[in-house]
Amino acid sequence: MSPHPHKDYAGAKLGMWLFLFTELILFGGLFLLYGAYLARYPEEFAAAGQEMHLIFGAANTVILLTSSLFAAMAVTAIQRDERRTAFRLLAGTVLCAAVFLFNKYLEWSAEIGRGIYPGSPQLAAGPPGESVFYGLYYLTVGLHGLHVLVGGTLLAVVAWRVRRGIIHAGDYVWLENSALYWHLVDLIWIFIFPLYYLIL
């Protein structure tokens, strides 16, 4: 057996791009659903949007943009065979993911604390459009949060592999694909933020 087995890097990248396309279809469907209900309940959506915690949304936007920058810089660092720098940048990305999820926990705790959650008596007593808004909000943001958790875990594994020397300048497709996934997570939030937090 050859000590350097063949690896299909082009196939791995193509596979990741195809996977990312299916993710875009998933969230694209949710955004289309949002648009359809926005046309039906414009006033209720605007009223519900004004109740969102803009500071949490803005802070998480900055956090994800920063984390995406770290991930891109990590790819550049590993291409230059700067494994220590790549590891630190990946650690920064994972830390940003953890802070994002913690902020989301605080925000959802505040929302639930004031009776804003799917099926709550408060929403049931209000206009139907507000229930739809918050139902879509929890579904979309919850699904995105799951992607943040998966992406953060994946990048933590990649960081460990970088530190062990398994991922290096000659073999970094794991890092490259993980960074692509993380950029998608960031891109999806860029759509979520204005739709739910900046709606007027």
Image (spheres, rainbow, N blue to C red):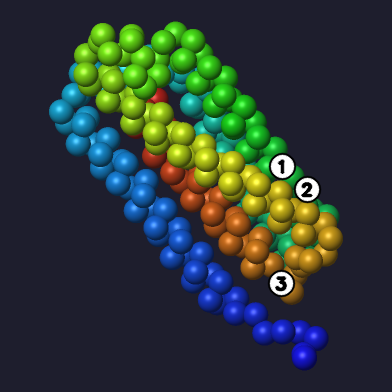
Packing grade of label 1 (10 A; few <14, some 14-19, many >=20) is: some
Three-letter amino acid code at the position of disc 3: Asp
User: Residue visible at 39% across and 34% down?
Assistant: 139
Residues at marks 3 and 1 touching, judged by CB atoms closer than 8 Å: no
Q: Height in image: 68 above or below 198?
A: below
Q: Height in image: 31 above or below 22?
A: above
Q: Position of residue 12 (x, y in %)?
A: 56, 72
Three-letter amino acid code at the position of disc 1: Gly
Looking at the rendered image, the quarter that the N terminus falls into is bottom right
User: Which is closer to the viewer, label 2 or label 3?
Assistant: 3
Mark 2 → mark 3, Cα distance in angstroms: 18 Å
Mark 2 → mark 1, Cα distance in angstroms: 6 Å
Residues at marks 2 and 1 touching, judged by CB atoms closer than 8 Å: yes
Mark 3 → mark 1, Cα distance in angstroms: 22 Å
Q: Is residue 197 left or right of residue 166?
A: left
Q: Name the residue tied to disc 2.
A: 88
Which element carries disc 1, helix, strand or loop? helix
| Residue reaching furthest to the bottom | 1
Q: Is residue 52 left or right of residue 68?
A: left
Sequence-wise first label, 2 or 3: 2
Q: Name the residue tied to disc 3.
A: 171
Q: Name the residue tied to disc 1.
A: 92
Observer able to see residue 80: no
Three-letter amino acid code at the position of disc 2: Arg
User: Residue visible at 22% across and 30% down?
Assistant: 38
